[in-house]
Image: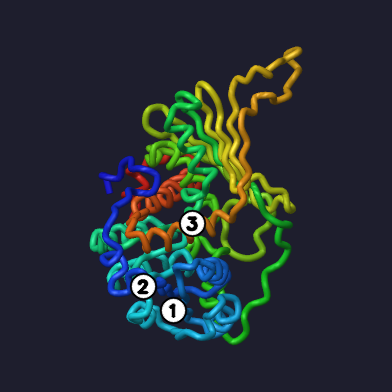
């Protein structure tokens, strides 16, 4: 783990012959299986079926009602095998690639099994809910088939607007960057009561089904939700993880269900070379959303989001009448996103397999997850926590 250092945007690209990457079925459609047919599995699974290079080959969930929902929501899923045991799906020879969309705490286990089965992998973020899970994933990764493509659900890395912004940064368009900010501000009305429990099952199963509310199953909001922004600042920071973090947070409204310890938090990450990364996160904002990143350089500023990218700098129109004139006239370029960035990511996944472009995002995705866990520890302990201390905690 001490060797985790900088890499490029998505962990490196290796070109292999399609017949090697895609086995005997090269130049035909890629059969994919879905492990975890809940809401995210249905959403991403449906997007995957839109790709002309793909075909749904199997679905799997331990709960029959989720299998029924998957058959309804994922086109073609009602015509392929449905498994209750993920090992059976991974042993299915019609499955070339697998979507892992199970609760976060199960990602390391299912990733490990998919590596052993030598499948192409698209694993939802984050890598795990805790340090031990992340380390388990890295141990499995050491045994990977290097001809297989491994992507994670950090889909910003495949967005045209994010990639354009990243090219501006690396080309020196905004000068030397010393500050990055991630805003993850969104949510609905504060919860006022616990959800109705599923009838006839144990409390543990109820918690697993509603895993997002429980820290041990999801990692909490900073790990399960804010990891997107954290991955982006790690990426734009040269694919380097933070060296330390300090943070504060708390609960603004009573938690009627689950055990979240924060519904708002601020974390300051210290990166190498004096670079800082700030995370500002607020939940339960009554529909208000401000999800974006900002990168401040000596010559300009980049702002990225799922809807647009913006470049700011010293334009000829920068005019200030007085010290109280706070209008922003620095916008140099704005480009709107015209595609769902998850669709951009799934398209890249299947195109890459078909062309033999082997990308492996495991290390960067684990680092981003661990960076989120580092922030969580800083919030919990109310003091500075170092990367090594976090790694040595499990």
Image quarter for residue 312? top right
Q: Is residue 320 above or below residue 215?
A: above
Q: Is residue 149 visible?
A: yes
Is the C-beta separation of discs 2 and 1 under 8 Å? yes
Tag 2, which secondary structure? loop
- Please tell me which of labels 2 and 1 falls first in the chain: 1
Image quarter for residue 149? bottom left
Q: Is residue 267 above or below residue 348?
A: above
Q: Which mark is residue 345?
A: 3
Instruction: Give residue 364's position: percent from left, percent from top.
Output: 37, 49
Instruction: Give residue 265's position: percent from left, percent from top.
Output: 58, 44
Query: How far is mark 3 from mark 1, CA to CA?
Result: 20 Å
Tag 3, which secondary structure? helix
Q: What is the residue that sits farthest to the left in this orientation? A: 143
Query: For mark 2, does the 10 Å Cα neighbourhood hold few (<14), some (14 to 19), or many (20 or more) residues?
Result: many
Q: Which residue is mark 1?
A: 57
Instruction: Give residue 331's position: percent from left, percent from top.
Output: 64, 28
Question: 262 or 332: nearer the eye?
Answer: 332
Q: Is residue 282 above or below residue 52?
A: above
Q: Which residue is mark 2?
A: 96
Q: How many marks?
A: 3
Question: 225 or 309: nearer the eye?
Answer: 309
Q: Is residue 40 visible?
A: no
User: What residue lies at 60% left-to-right and 35% top-to-bottom?
Assistant: 310
User: What residue lies at 43% left-to-right and 52% top-to-bottom?
Assistant: 369
Q: Work out which quarter of the rendered image holds the C terminus and state it.
A: bottom left
Q: What is the residue that sits farthest to the front in this orientation? A: 27
User: What residue lies at 37% left-to-right and 40% top-to-bottom?
Assistant: 240
- Please tell me which of labels 3 and 1 falls first in the chain: 1
């Amino acid at each position: 783990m001490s060797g985790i250092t900088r890499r490029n945007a998505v962990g490196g690209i290796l070109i292999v012959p399609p017949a090697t990457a895609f086995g005997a079925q090269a130049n035909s459609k890629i059969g994919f299986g879905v492990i975890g047919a809940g809401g995210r599995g249905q959403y991403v699974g449906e997007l995957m079926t839109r790709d002309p290079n793909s075909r749904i080959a199997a679905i799997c969930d331990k709960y029959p009602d989720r299998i029924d929902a998957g058959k309804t929501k994922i086109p073609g899923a009602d015509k392929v095998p449905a498994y209750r045991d993920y090992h059976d799906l991974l042993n299915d020879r019609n499955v070339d690639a697998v979507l892992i969309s199970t609760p976060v705490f199960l990602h390391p286990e299912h990733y490990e099994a998919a590596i052993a089965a030598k499948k192409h992998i698209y694993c939802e973020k984050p890598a795990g809910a805790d340090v031990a899970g992340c380390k388990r994933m890295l141990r499995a990764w050491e045994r990977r088939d290097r001809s297989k493509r491994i992507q994670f659900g950090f889909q910003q890395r495949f967005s045209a607007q994010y990639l354009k912004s990243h090219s501006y940064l690396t080309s020196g368009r905004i000068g030397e960057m010393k500050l990055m900010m991630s805003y993850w501000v969104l949510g609905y009305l504060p919860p006022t009561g616990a959800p109705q429990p599923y009838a006839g099952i144990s409390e543990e199963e109820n918690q697993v089904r509603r895993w997002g509310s429980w820290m041990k199953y999801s990692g909490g909001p900073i790990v399960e939700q804010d990891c997107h922004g954290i991955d982006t600042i790690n990426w734009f920071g040269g694919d380097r993880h933070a060296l330390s973090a300090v943070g504060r947070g708390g609960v603004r409204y009573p938690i009627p269900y689950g055990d979240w310890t924060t519904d708002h938090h601020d974390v300051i990450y210290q990166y190498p070379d004096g670079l800082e990364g700030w995370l500002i996160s607020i939940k339960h904002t009554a529909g208000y959303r401000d999800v974006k990143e900002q990168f401040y350089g000596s010559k300009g500023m980049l702002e990225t989001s799922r809807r647009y990218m913006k470049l700011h700098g010293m334009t000829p129109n920068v005019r200030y009448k007085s010290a109280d004139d706070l209008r922003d006239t620095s916008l140099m370029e704005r480009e709107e996103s015209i595609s769902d960035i998850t669709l951009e990511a799934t398209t890249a996944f299947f195109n890459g397999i078909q062309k033999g472009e082997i990308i492996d995002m495991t290390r960067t995705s684990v680092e981003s997850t661990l960076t989120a866990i580092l922030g969580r520890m800083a919030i919990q302990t109310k003091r500075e926590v170092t990367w090594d201390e976090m790694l040595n905690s499990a």
